[in-house]
Image (tube, rainbow, N blue to C red):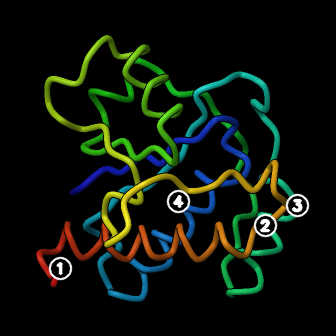
Amino acid sequence: MKRILFVCHGNICRSPMGEFIFKDLVRQAGLEDQFEVQSAATSREELGNPVYPPARRELGKHGIDCAGKTARQLTREDYRRFDLLIGMDRENLWNMQRLFGRDPQQKLHLLMDYTCRPGEVADPWYSGDFSTAWKDILEGCQGLLAHLTGEEG
């Protein structure tokens, strides 16, 4: 079983979108028994809060439910527990490296590195553009799944 953890600053926008988009792709592919997928925050600011309403609405537009998800903080134990820890931007990656000390098993990656246009998923918290975040995260999740299943082109 592959264990994937999506990570962003507060775990109320991009990382839960990644978690639930990836879970939906896995479900559609009939691979639920092959993946464990979660998300977490690098900060403590939103701990216990539900997915931000605009992110929840964007997921809902695509038939994806994230009910019950609340923000949790990334822990040192997560490095041992998960096979891949996927950040949404370089600051997330930097904060993960700081927490874990280093990345000897090469588990830390940016989501957009699994696309033909590596970089960062813009933070919709500041832009309000959850549609573009959806498109970026979907593309990244599709690329990640193709990479993990050996179906990348």
Instruction: Check disc 4 and report its element: helix, strand or loop.
Output: helix
Q: Earlier in the sequence, mark 3 or mark 2?
A: 3
Could you classify mark 3 by the number of other residues whose Cα lies within 10 Å: few (under 14), some (14-19), or many (20 or more)? few
Q: Earlier in the sequence, mark 3 or mark 4?
A: 4
* Residue underneath mark 2: 129
Q: Amino acid at mark 3?
A: Pro
* Residue underneath mark 3: 53
Q: Earlier in the sequence, mark 4 or mark 1?
A: 4
Q: Amino acid at mark 1?
A: Glu
Q: Nearer the viewer, residue 61 or 134?
A: 134
Name the mark on residue 152: 1
Describe residue 51's horizontal placement relative to residue 119 as left or right: right
Name the mark on residue 19: 4
Circle nearer the viewer, 1 or 3 = 1
Up/down of 99 relative to 113, above or below: above
Q: Locate residue 55, reporting x and y percent.
A: 77, 64
Task: Give the residue displayed 11% in from the left and 75% down from the top.
Answer: 150
Instruction: Check disc 2 and report its element: helix, strand or loop.
Output: loop
